[in-house]
Image (cartoon, rainbow, N blue to C red):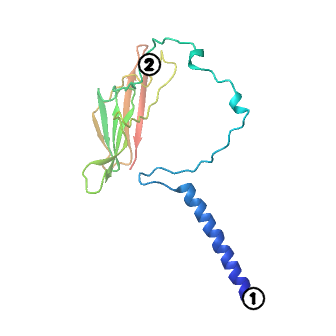
């Protein structure tokens, strides 16, 4: 009976060793962190060598005068212009008057890094990590879009012990339509 247990342990050990060995082959990396893989060499059939492969002289020459500009276009319109700042117990939010868009949001109680005075930024208008919360209405001819200019009564709003803070942004159209975009902040 003891010999069966020994053979069973040897079989389990060999299975684990083979699995580990195959895993090492598929997951191995060199000193630079590049994954090393093994490829199998497949013999070439004799009929494959008879395939007619075109030469460079068989391909027509086409002159190309099209130049493609791959430089991304960055809209810096949110970094310029007026904005309203809202300060609550948890957040500091900057709302652009262009479209009433939230362009920056910071967590007041959490630093960007340990032992840092800079606040952690949730939303950003920096070119490398841009993110905006935008909205608009349709039809474009009669209602404000995310490009329309809003006005605000004040430049800064503070929650400070209130149950709710409502930040109104007002748009007035040429046709007499008045749209108020309200942002509600609660503690």
Image quarter for residue 99? top left
Residue drawn at the location 33% of the way across and 27% of the way down = 76
- The percent position of residue 154, horizontal first and vertical second, equals 28, 33
Image quarter for residue 9? bottom right
The residue identified by callout 2 is 68
In the image, is residue 20 above or below residue 53? below
Residue drawn at the location 47% of the way across and 26% of the way down = 136
- Front-most of residues 13 and 187: 13
Classify mark 1: helix, strand or loop: loop
Residue drawn at the location 35% of the way across and 50% of the way down = 90
Image quarter for residue 147? top left
- The percent position of residue 1, horizontal first and vertical second, equals 75, 88
Disc 2 versus disc 1: distance between alpha carbons?
Answer: 77 Å
Q: Is residue 17 toward the left or the right of residue 151 in the image?
A: right
In the image, is residue 28 above or below residue 43? below
Residue drawn at the location 45% of the way across and 23% of the way down = 145
Q: Is residue 24 toward the left or the right of residue 86 in the image?
A: right
- The percent position of residue 119, horizontal first and vertical second, equals 30, 48
In the image, is residue 164 above or below residue 128? below
The residue identified by callout 1 is 1
- The percent position of residue 57, horizontal first and vertical second, equals 57, 15
- Front-most of residues 102 and 112: 112
């Amino acid at each position: 009976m003891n010999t069966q247990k020994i053979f069973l342990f040897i079989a389990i050990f060999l299975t684990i060793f083979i699995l580990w060995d195959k895993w090492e082959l598929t997951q191995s990396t060199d000193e630079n962190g590049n994954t090393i893989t093994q490829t199998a060499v497949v013999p070439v059939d004799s009929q494959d060598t008879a395939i007619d492969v075109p030469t460079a002289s068989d391909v027509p020459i086409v002159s190309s005068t099209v130049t493609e500009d791959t430089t991304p276009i960055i809209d810096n319109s949110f970094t310029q212009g007026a904005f309203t700042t809202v300060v609550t117990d948890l957040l500091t939010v900057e709302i652009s008057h262009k479209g009433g868009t939230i362009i920056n949001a910071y967590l007041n109680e959490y630093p960007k890094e340990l032992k840092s005075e800079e606040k952690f930024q949730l939303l950003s208008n920096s070119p490398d990590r841009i993110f905006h919360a935008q909205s608009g209405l349709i039809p474009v001819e009669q209602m404000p879009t995310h490009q329309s200019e809003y006005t605000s009564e004040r430049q800064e709003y503070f929650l400070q012990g209130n149950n709710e803070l409502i930040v109104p942004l007002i748009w007035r159209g040429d046709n007499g339509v008045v749209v108020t975009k309200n942002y509600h902040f609660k503690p």
